[in-house]
Amino acid sequence: MIGLNVDLGVLPGILGTMIPIVAIVGGIGLALANRYLKSKERMEMISRGMDVSAFKDHDMAEAIAYGRNRRNRSPLRGGLVAMGAGMGLLISYYLCHTVLQGNEDENAAIYFGVIAMFVGLALILSHLLEKKAPAEDKQ
């Protein structure tokens, strides 16, 4: 009888690493397989002379409609979010190194909280600015 020396102490670490990798690869694989099968089905319908206008990809139609109706303010939104993240990082750095003066590991949550707060404020400001601006029709 051959005895196997297996150290089960490393198993949680291996599983903790492999589960997210398998989930991401599996999710991407499912999305690509779904897209491939839809395309293959559509091509089969075309080759048989069937009407494919009823077989619309609703996700794509919604994306096109969203792109047409969306206001062209993405540079404004991106700039405000970047500014909000920068302000949050600057203020949280200042808080951790002057006001709180503790171990940086103890104050790590402050970085996330302050950055999220300023990014949220930037998005609210972007929404208010876009709401005031008239919508441009591209038709």
Image (cartoon, helix red, strand yellow):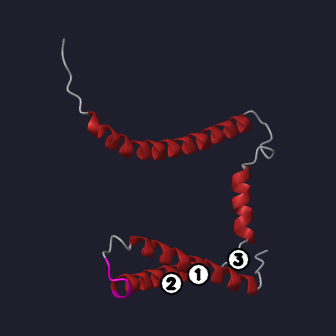
Judge by depth and name the residue closer to the eye, 38 or 20.
20
Which quarter of the picture shows residue 43? top right
Give the numbered dot on residue 58.
none
- Which amino acid, by three-letter code, is at mark 2? Met
Highlighted magenta segment, given as a residue range: 98-102
Q: Which residue is mark 2?
A: 83
Q: Is residue 41 visible?
A: yes
Q: How would you rate the neighbour count of disc 2 (Cα within 10 Å): few for under 14, some for 14-19, many for 20 or more? A: some
**Contact, mark 2 vs mark 1 (Cβ under 8 Å):** yes
Q: Amino acid at mark 3?
A: Arg
For the question of whether residue 133 can be seen, the reply is: no
Where is residue 120 shown, x and y percent of the image? 59, 76
Which element carries disc 2, helix, strand or loop? helix
Residue at which label 3 appears: 71
For disc 1, the marked residue is 122
Earlier sequence position, callout 2 versus callout 3: 3
Tag nearer the camera, 2 or 3:
2
Q: Are marks 2 and 3 in contact (CB under 8 Å)?
A: no
Tell me which amino acid carries mark 1.
Ala
Q: Nearer the viewer, residue 104 or 74?
A: 104
32 left or right, relative to 136 = left
Q: N-terminal of the two: label 2 or label 1?
A: 2
